[in-house]
Image: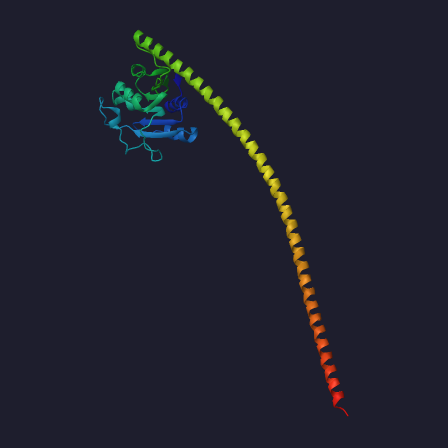
Amino acid sequence: MRARDDTTAVIDSTLAGGPRVLHIGVEPSTVPRRLAQEHDREVECLRWPLDAGADEQWGPEVDLAERADGWVQPFLVAPVDVVVVEGVLDEGPSPDAFLRTLGSGALVPGGLVVVSGARDLTTPLQSAGFTLESEAATEDGRHVTVARFPSFTTARPLSPEADEASAAENRRLAHELERTRELLGRERATIAREMQLGKDELLAMDRQVAELQDRLQRLRHKNVLLRARVAQVARERDLAEARAAELADELFLTHDSRAVRTVASMVERARRRRSP
């Protein structure tokens, strides 16, 4: 299979994996920028040292202070979905050691590794435990190899004893899975009953709230009537007090007039007695 160019082949192969991508290259490349800007991938970049020896281990030789571009984030020690390797294995470290170290911590189970370079790395990838998915030669004579890091569902045992042990482990896991499903079913039924009880309680509480609101409305209406009655009684009391004040004034005037008439009568009788 022959691809148009190395960059296009690498990008197309990378898009088959997950969103988190680690790019390792000898020189700055347009692949990380295009993956991030055109395909919304989360890309982290590392530049491989040019003076790394053939037998050097991968991890310690990575210079974290020297990155391909300034916009990329520094490499975090956490598994990624895809690792893109451009030109690192042409003259750099041993492919077997590099790929084994790569698969031991940088990739998630089932993750992809996309290797671009002048060397055909099909055999080293398979020796390192990767499952080969595709291999293409570009127009400029470079190889783009895509392999998948095996997960526990795709790994194969290496011997009949391991096969039997794996089958026994699979049976045990299937039994555990069945028990877990049964427990989950019970938990779901219990949760469903509790949710139904909760709904019934909420409905009962809603009815109680509606009744309380109705009672509150009636009490408010009674309160309005009582306030109106109190205001009416207050007005009647004011009128009664005013009438009582008027009657008191009239009574005082009445008593005062009677006393004046009595005094006048006594004075008149006294005059009559003195006159000859």
Q: Quadrant of the N terminus?
A: top left
Q: Position of residue 34 (x, y in %)?
A: 40, 29
On the question of residue 120 being in view, the answer is no
Q: Which quarter of the picture shows residue 205?
A: top right
Image position of 181 (left or right of 106): right
Which residue is painted at 26% across and 24% down in the image?
58
On the question of residue 42 being in view, the answer is yes
- The count of marks equals 0
Q: Nearer the viewer, residue 119 or 146?
A: 146
Q: Which quarter of the picture shows residue 160?
A: top left
Q: Nearer the viewer, residue 266 or 11?
A: 266
Q: Quadrant of the C terminus?
A: bottom right
Q: Nearer the viewer, residue 100 or 155?
A: 155
Q: Which quarter of the picture shows residue 243?
A: bottom right
Q: Residue furthest right?
A: 276
Image position of 19 (left or right of 87): right
- Coloring scheme used: rainbow
Q: Nearer the viewer, residue 216 or 83?
A: 216
Which residue is painted at 42% across and 15% down in the image?
178
* 208 over 160 or under it: above or below: below
Q: Residue furthest top?
A: 160
Q: Residue furthest bottom?
A: 276
Q: Position of residue 252 (x, y in %)?
A: 69, 72
Q: Position of residue 130 (x, y in %)?
A: 33, 16
Q: Position of residue 119 (x, y in %)?
A: 30, 18
Which residue is painted at 62% across and 46% down in the image?
220
Which residue is painted at 76% across and 88% down in the image?
272
